[in-house]
Image (cartoon, helix red, strand yellow):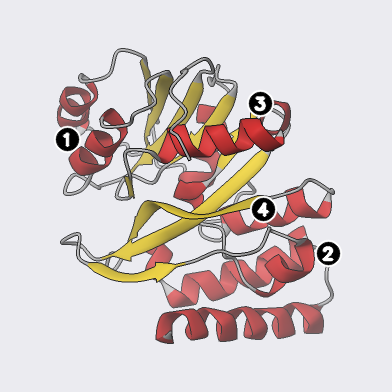
């Protein structure tokens, strides 16, 4: 399939940053290397400690279209993304975590597929890499984000997602420390929107030791809140769902 190079649609790229100085340059360089060039960067510096702000500004200087938002205190990824989304002007919205990477055809390939099938929401397969960029495994998605399947396991990687403005301007991330993206995908799917998968791997998710996303205890708490509060399930069903979610998570880690 040929690469989509018309660059006719503006894509807003949202990045939240908290103490990722070791990786952010590689993340930004993977955006700069994109074949698709019509994008804007909405970057949220989510830390009251401004010791890394000059470093961030220097790395962002490679982009012409950019907006830097500086939080007066650490708000967390959910509230920071919601803040960023209020400034997005794009026809499409894409997310990337500040330690993840995109392959150079990520935007061009994904927007071409979405345009072809009039998709409002799409996600892709992705690679799992370590702190030294070594490939650990591949996460292949071969089905859409149907609500019953998503309830069992979050197989949608945040940095693979692209959303059309008809949808992203109506959504917000719930105020969870982790699992916030999972809760949002469930909400969108439950409301009847199609979450379309693209089997091609276009991103790399970095597995970092000690990160909040790697905290098992925090994830278990937020998973319970996700089902109990945001999905309005009863206590026992929420406990059961967390166990099922943990099983599928462990299965993915092993295989």
Q: Which residue is mark 4?
A: 185
Which badge, 3 or 1, comes first in the chain's sequence?
1
User: What's the residue at 38%, 46% (across, down)?
Assistant: 97
Instruction: Label 1: state its secondary structure.
Output: loop
- Residue 242: where, in percent of width, then height? 65, 79
Is residue 172 visible in the rendered structure shown here?
no
Closest to the camera, between mark 3 and mark 1, is 3
Q: Which residue is mark 1?
A: 51
Say left or right for 94 vs 64. Answer: right
- Say if 226 sits above or below 22 in the image: below
Is residue 183 visible in the rendered structure shown here?
yes
Which badge, 4 or 3, comes first in the chain's sequence?
3
- Say if 216 sits above or below 48 in the image: below
Closer to the camera in the image, 236 or 11? 11
Which badge, 2 or 1, comes first in the chain's sequence?
1
User: What's the residue at 61%, 58% (across, down)?
Assistant: 182
User: What's the residue at 32%, 38% (across, down)?
Assistant: 104
Instruction: Estimate how packed mark 2 is, as few (under 14), some (14 to 19) or many (20 or more) residues with alpha carbons within 10 Å.
Output: few
Q: CA distance from mark 3 to mark 2?
A: 28 Å
Q: CA distance from mark 4 to mark 3?
A: 16 Å
Q: Which mark is residue 232?
A: 2
Instruction: Label 4: state its secondary structure.
Output: helix
Q: Which mark is residue 165?
A: 3
Instruction: Label 3: state its secondary structure.
Output: helix
- Residue 247: where, in percent of width, then height? 58, 86
Q: CA distance from mark 3 to mark 1?
A: 35 Å
Please report contact status of discs 1 and 4: CB closer than 8 Å, yes or no.
Answer: no
Q: CA distance from mark 1 to mark 4?
A: 34 Å
């Amino acid at each position: 399939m040929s690469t989509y190079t018309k660059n006719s649609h503006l894509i807003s790229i949202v990045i939240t940053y908290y103490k990722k100085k070791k990786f952010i340059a590689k993340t930004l360089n993977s955006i700069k290397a994109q074949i698709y060039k019509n994008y804007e960067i909405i970057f949220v510096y989510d830390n009251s400690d401004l010791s890394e702000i000059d470093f961030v500004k220097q790395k962002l200087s490679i982009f012409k279209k950019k907006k830097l938002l500086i939080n007066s205190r650490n708000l967390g990824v959910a509230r920071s993304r919601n803040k960023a989304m209020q400034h997005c002007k794009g026809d499409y919205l894409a997310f990337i975590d500040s330690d993840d990477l995109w392959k150079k055809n990520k935007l061009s390939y994904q927007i071409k597929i979405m345009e072809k099938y009039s998709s409002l929401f799409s996600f892709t397969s992705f690679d799992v890499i370590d702190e030294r960029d070594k490939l650990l495994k591949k996460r292949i998605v071969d089905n859409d984000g149907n609500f019953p399947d998503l309830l069992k396991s979050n197989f949608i990687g945040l940095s693979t997602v692209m959303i059309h403005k008809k949808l992203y301007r109506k959504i917000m991330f719930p105020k969870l420390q982790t699992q916030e993206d999972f809760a949002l995908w469930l909400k969108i799917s439950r409301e009847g929107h199609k979450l379309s998968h693209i089997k091609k791997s276009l991103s790399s998710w970095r597995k970092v030791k000690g990160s909040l996303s790697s905290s098992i205890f925090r994830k278990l708490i937020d998973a319970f809140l996700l089902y109990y509060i945001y999905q309005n399930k009863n206590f026992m069903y929420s406990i059961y769902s967390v166990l099922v979610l943990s099983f599928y998570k462990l299965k993915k880690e092993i295989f």
